[in-house]
Amino acid sequence: MIKDEKDYITVWGIFDTISKEVRNSISKCAESGKTLGIGVYSDECCDTKLFTHPDKPLEHRMQIAQGLSGVTFVFPVDSLNDYENEKAAEIAYREYLNHKESLDKSKKYKVGFVIGSFDVLHPGHIENINLSSEICEVLYAVVKTDERVFDRKNKYPIQNTTERAANLRALKNVDGVLFYDLDSTRVDIIRSVISQFKREHPTETIEEKDLVAIFGDDLKEKEEERKRNGDWGEVNIEFTPRPEEKMKVMSSSVYQALIRQRGGIARYESEERKHLVINGYGIPNQGSSDGEREL
């Protein structure tokens, strides 16, 4: 179904986890130049109509969708009916236009970076990245490699280094991805961030004092001690809120345990692929044998 009169594209899906198919589909839609809206299936719709059971509630899955590069607005969908979902998309689009902010926020730092494994990207990661992007003009994500994770935790991540980095590159507020190798030090991270920025901005100057390392406040005591000891040099340190109660239900360890218990990451990627629908107004859909449009 092609509707060229509309100036936005909609994609409907579960968004419980991010897979290669999801990233590629969203990227393809974003390249059209039209406003991109994401419809996320409600918990009830997943249970009673798609017969799948996401680990994350609707609110958290909408946060994941909103964090993807190229996505402008997000809305819940309760139906598999095209017409009903079109109406929900139109309402969400009008609300987006009404509430659109035209003024950019001033940034406190030139360059910032966050460090983590980012294994199975979840709303807590995206919330931290979004908050971090509000205080710096350019934000890099520094990903711990498989080897470093194994050396520290004696187990490999659910998603490998390449997949985790690709998920981060798909986020609108991540300007680049660097790697925290097995033998890397904090000095190495600082050098890598500065070198990356200089490659991308050859006419600009940057020093350590222009950088900010951003952590969740559960690491405040540890990182402030490292700062006092000189481990971070002249790099600034900032912290984002990470309430203990929220961490109990929205953390990497929680989601990783659920994924392992419920059949592994392949099961989640299969569900995402099966139930992802593009209403592209000119971007072709791949239909399934039963008439439902899927990718």
Image: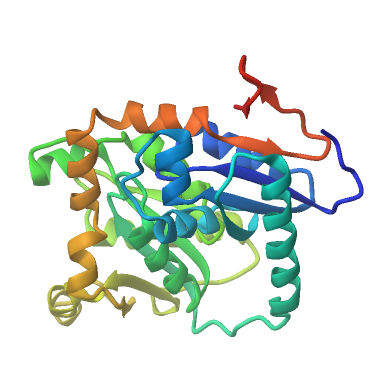
Residue 86: x %, y % from top left: 73, 49
Quadrant of residue 60 within the rendered picture: bottom left
Q: Is residue 132 visible?
A: yes
Residue 43: x %, y % from top left: 42, 50
Image quadrant occupied by the N terminus: top right
Q: Is residue 196 above or below residue 278?
A: below
Residue at the far front: name it.
Answer: 48
Residue at the far right: name it.
Answer: 5
Q: Is residue 177 above or below residue 227?
A: above
- Type of colouring: rainbow
Side (left or right) of 107 relative to 211:
right
Which of the pair 143/272 is nearer the observer? Answer: 272
Quadrant of residue 188 within the rendered picture: bottom left
Q: Is residue 32 above or below residue 139?
A: above
| Residue pictured at 20% horizontal, 78% vertical | 227
Q: Is residue 18 visible?
A: no
| Residue pictured at 33% horizontal, 62% vertical | 124
Count of labels in the image: 0
| Residue pictured at 46% horizontal, 68% vertical | 130
Residue 207: x %, y % from top left: 44, 74
Residue 21: x %, y % from top left: 53, 31
